[in-house]
Image (cartoon, coloured by chain):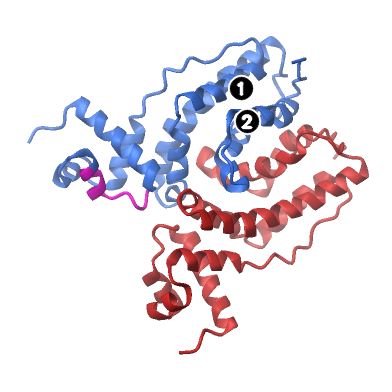
Chain colours: A blue, B red
Amino acid sequence: MSRLTPERTDQLYAAVLRLLADVGYDKLTMDKVAEATRSSKATLYRQWGSKEALVVAAIGALAPEPSQLPDTGSLRGDLIGLACEHEDVDDPEMDLVVAVIHACKTHPELAESVRERIVTSRSAEVGILLDRAVRRGEVAPDNPALPFVIVTMIGPALLREVIDGEVADVAYVSRFIDAVLLPALGVTPSAP
Amino acid sequence: MSRLTPERTDQLYAAVLRLLADVGYDKLTMDKVAEATRSSKATLYRQWGSKEALVVAAIGALAPEPSQLPDTGSLRGDLIGLACEHEDVDDPEMDLVVAVIHACKTHPELAESVRERIVTSRSAEVGILLDRAVRRGEVAPDNPALPFVIVTMIGPALLREVIDGEVADVAYVSRFIDAVLLPALGVTPSAP
């Protein structure tokens, strides 16, 4: 039997990621994938060998978003713009991270694929915004908070639901940026 | 048949939480609990009714740690002391949060028990340290970062492993406190 076409493979990966975000890594089964994608389990196993390999391939195929990075002239505007953008496009990547975070502990290849495809591209985006802020003179190039911006921003986005029982929306993320991130980076809030 | 003794129940809850942190919520089964605790499944179902109810009860029974809160005279010392303490006692609560974070989305009672027993007690501890800092005049009582301290601190602890592939140890958390949290709270670093 021939291999799946690239189009069919893309559709299948997208379905795997939707299912994964929905049920979580442990409850994802090849049976569920076969059913959701109208494939045969034999085809799935022949092409990918295992559930872990299929999930790693699906995450690995995540296209870097053709991100229109905001460029508002201020770090505050750029960071809030980035938060809005990810909310507007119904960004499923955070759901994915939550769905696999525990499985990552025992599946190093899975953890590696999450880092490579999701964390690295987010870091790169934020890195561009921070570089601009440094070049504009908004942030000192040796500000010690710079290496912590990603880990600081991702916390509220992922964890507010667990901590407060409420979703982290743009208004919440904006307050967080103003109250924590910009002061830590030494950025003085401009007049509204 | 009589109910389990309180001692036996405590042992059983402890075993459930260890197992949960290890395999995650979805892979935890009543069979595994029965095996690990040498109980019969019939007993487990008679007493708790379901896996979710058993896990909620086990988390609900987590004793508030008889925490010796550090009192070093500075917020920096207190926060770093708190991080050390949780590392020293091999704190399993963060592992628990990771193990159930995805399941919380579809199990509101589970989410509620995590908030009540884990988040609330952590928040209370940090709240005491922050209150002291405000009373000492280290932090302004209306500092806008105050409501975000928990969500900011828990991010690196939970997420560094996913983001950097490295465990968040006390050295890392200390750097984070110095670079992000204290500047956001307007606390000037004292000379080392």
Specify the farthest residue to the bottom.
Answer: B1
Q: Quadrant of the C terminus of chain B?
A: top right
Q: Residue at x 25, y 44 (%)?
A: A33
Mark 2: secondary structure: helix
Horizontal and vertical percent for residue B31? 37, 71
Q: Residue at x 43, y 80 (%)?
A: B43
Q: Nearer the viewer, residue A120 or B48?
A: B48
The answer for how far apart the CA atoms under marks 2 and 1 are is 8 Å
Q: Nearer the viewer, residue A175 or A147?
A: A175
- Residue type at the position of mark 1: Ile
Left-right relation of A116 to A36: right
Q: Is residue A40 visible?
A: yes
Q: Is residue A109 visible?
A: no
Left-right relation of B153 to B104: right
Whether tag 2 and tag 1 are in contact, CB under 8 A, the answer is yes
Mark 1: few/some/many CA within 10 Å (<14, 14-19, 20+) = some
- Residue type at the position of mark 2: Val
Magenta span: A25-35
Horizontal and vertical percent for residue B95? 55, 56
Chain to which the residue tagged by mark 1 belongs: A
Asked if badge 2 and badge 1 are on a common chain, one would say yes
Residue A31: say if magenta: yes
Decide: is B13 above or below B94.
below
* Residue A173: assigned label: 2
Decide: is A189 above or below B124.
above
* Residue A80: assigned label: 1
Q: Nearer the viewer, residue B179 or A168?
A: A168
